[in-house]
Amino acid sequence: MATDPSSSVNTDLLQQPLQPDEDETDSALGDDLSTLSQSIRSSMYDYHYENGRRYRAYGKSQYLLPNDEAEQNRLDLLHHIFKMVLHGELYTAPLESSNMQRVLDVGTGTGIWALELADQFPSATIVGTDISPIQPEWVPPNCHFYVDDAETAWIHNEPFDFIHGRALCGGIANWPEFYSEAYRNLKPGGWMEMQEHECWLNSDDDTINQAPWCKEWIENVDIASTRVGKRLNVAHLHRQWMIDAGFVNVEEQVYKIPIGSWPKDKKLKEIGRVQWVQMIEAIPTFSIAYYTRVLGYSLDQAQIMVEGVKSEFLDKKLHLYLRWHFVRGQRSPS
Ligand SMILES: C[S@@+](CC[C@H](N)C(=O)[O-])C[C@H]1O[C@@H](n2cnc3c(N)ncnc32)[C@H](O)[C@@H]1O
């Protein structure tokens, strides 16, 4: 999806109390891994269908987000918002293009980030891995996708200059182990960047307390994902995990991403509008399996909750936002 550079935002504004627009009335809105991957097992495509959504094969992982076309469309929209926040950029790490030979995108999803990076660095090799084979078949020669579980030992025959992960919450049980594998697979001086949204809703004017469906939703999803052993709301923990794994020069930027066109600032309004669409898709994505499989709700009960949260996202009196974290760190150069 192309990004309109004019849609980038003044990121300073995303760190201050968000100002609502009082006038707003509109309410609509090639390595060892390659050898492994060549023996493509049919089990990779052994999908599990449940409540009208497609998931990775049931029992193979406790990843409870779907991987169907609707989810892939949501991921591409999310990519667009990440780029709006970063002024059209794909990363915040101070990369030197002359040093970029090998890049790993862990949990690459549709591969959209990896494909764009491959375009930006045509002489680098970009490797994207994921537990679901939902990446395109036709890719530039410097981009390679493999099915691989980041919760097992990372098998790469050469280290990377840059390792990137985005929106991986709910996919990893043991984050310290994840960061230690990442560190091991970086060249000395190489960079790691994690871009992650919180799975928690906030407001600067206390209007979150007028949103009972939303409050119940985030609390239940936190309880359910913690019970599964892969907590969703971990964005605020990455910085310390990175430091604990031995990364140096660790820096974090935290931005407030509004839901809806309620902010006063024009660019924030634009981000909020796109984020609203993304969030409407995200409610069932982040709910149905957690509510039905883990919390024991019937599908009807889960859908009533989804509609309740949607109705509050439509209410312009509520000034809700999520915090997004951009954390980067470096493997010690020596
Ligand atoms: C919310 S999506 C984000 C995709 C992509 N990073 C992006 O930002 O567009 C999370 C992805 O992580 C993948 N994933 C979850 N657990 C994983 C694991 N243990 N190893 C590798 N990929 C995983 C999922 O299959 C999914 O494609």
Image: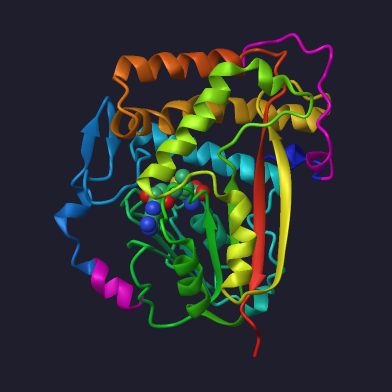
Residue 1 sits in quarter: top right
Residue 57 falls left or right of residue 171: left
Let me know if residue 280 is in the magenta part: no
The picture places residue 134, in percent across and down from the top left corner, at 34, 48
Left or right for 96, reference 22: left
Q: Main secondary structure of the magenta part?
A: loop
Q: Position of residue 201 (x, y in %)?
A: 62, 32
The residue lying at 48 percent from left, 61 percent from top is 175
| Residue 74 x %, y % | 48, 35
Q: Is residue 300 above or below residue 89?
A: above
Question: Is 105 on the left-hand or right-hand side of 70?
Answer: right
Q: Is residue 20 visible?
A: yes
Residue for point 48% across, 44% down = 232
Span of residues in magenta: 12-37
Q: Specify the quadrant that holds the C terminus.
A: bottom right
Q: Is residue 25 magenta?
A: yes
